[in-house]
Amino acid sequence: MEIDIIDEGVLPLLDIITILLVDDNPINGIVLLALLKMVTKDRLVRISFTLLIIVLGSLNSE
């Protein structure tokens, strides 16, 4: 039940936030997410790496 909520709501939202926050060029965010989806199938690992990308992208923009 909880995993379905993560699949339907959280992952697409995190993907959109990552694309918008990673760089001035959104293509970099799209490439990072595509590579991440190809590398791992585990949801928890994907969420962790996506949050790490968001944090590092926001630190680099400051």
Image (cartoon, rainbow, N blue to C red):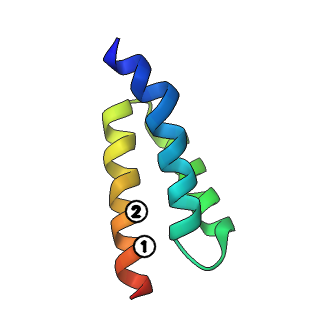
Residue 24, quarter of picture: bottom right
Task: Give the amino acid at mark 1.
Answer: Gly
The label number, if any, that marks residue 57 in the structure image: 1
> Going by the image, does 19 lie left or right of 44?
right
The label number, if any, that marks residue 8 in the structure image: none
> Going by the image, does 15 lie left or right of 55?
right
Which percent across, then down, holds residue 16? 57, 52
Q: Residue at x 47, y 26 (%)?
A: 7
Q: Residue at x 41, y 23 (%)?
A: 5
Which percent across, then down, holds residue 11? 47, 38
Image quadrant holding the N terminus, namely: top left
Image quadrant holding the C terminus, namely: bottom left
> Going by the image, does 44 lie left or right of 38?
left
Give the CA separation, mark 2 to mark 1.
6 Å
Marks 2 and 1 close (CB-CB < 8 Å): yes
The label number, if any, that marks residue 53 in the structure image: 2
Q: Secondary structure at mark 1?
A: helix
Residue 45 vertical position relative to residue 15 in the rendered view, above or below: above
- Packing grade of label 2 (10 A; few <14, some 14-19, many >=20) is some
